[in-house]
Image: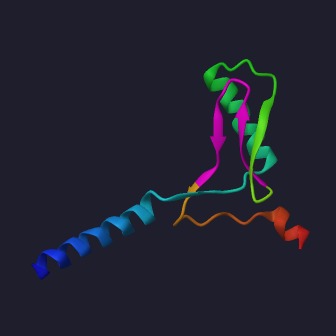
């Protein structure tokens, strides 16, 4: 009985580590240039006729995505285990 409990515990641990390293994501800030480029790519790829972005999606006073007038929603996400690039704008603010 104890062997089965230990086996189940190890399987659960391995599954959690796999999820954490390869599936778990968090939202990351996106720069205005990248945001504009992503919106233009969305318009070109989908044939969207929207004239402007409907609203910005913010988290902790930083823009992480946008909503288009057509209903499309983009949120910048990265894997938890992925290192985020340095934000030069933050360095200048300090």
Q: Residue at x 84, y 70 (%)?
A: 91
Left or right of 38 in this view: 94: right
Residue 59 to residue 84: above or below:
above
Residue 61 lies, in percent from the top left, at 80, 57
What residue occupies the far left of the structure in this picture? Answer: 1
Residue 86 to residue 47: above or below:
below
Residue 8 painted magenta: no
Q: Which image quarter: residue 93?
A: bottom right
Q: Give the main secondary structure, helix, strand or loop, of the magenta stretch.
A: strand
Residue 93 to residue 62: above or below:
below
Q: How many marks?
A: 0
Q: Residue at x 81, y 64 (%)?
A: 88
Residue 10 lies, in percent from the top left, at 25, 75
The quarter of the rendered structure image containing the C terminus is bottom right
Residue 75 painted magenta: yes
The range drawn in magenta is 62-77
Residue 1 lies, in percent from the top left, at 9, 78
Q: Nearer the viewer, residue 41 or 25?
A: 25
């Amino acid at each position: 009985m104890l062997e089965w409990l230990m086996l189940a515990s190890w399987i659960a641990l391995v599954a959690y580590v796999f999820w954490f390293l390869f599936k778990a994501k968090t939202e990351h800030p996106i720069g205005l240039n990248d945001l504009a480029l992503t919106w233009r790519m969305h318009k070109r790829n989908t044939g969207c006729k929207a004239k402007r972005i409907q609203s910005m999606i913010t988290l902790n006073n930083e823009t992480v995505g946008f909503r288009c007038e057509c209903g499309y929603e983009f949120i910048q996400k990265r894997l938890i285990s992925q290192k985020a690039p340095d934000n030069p704008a933050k360095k200048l603010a300090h």
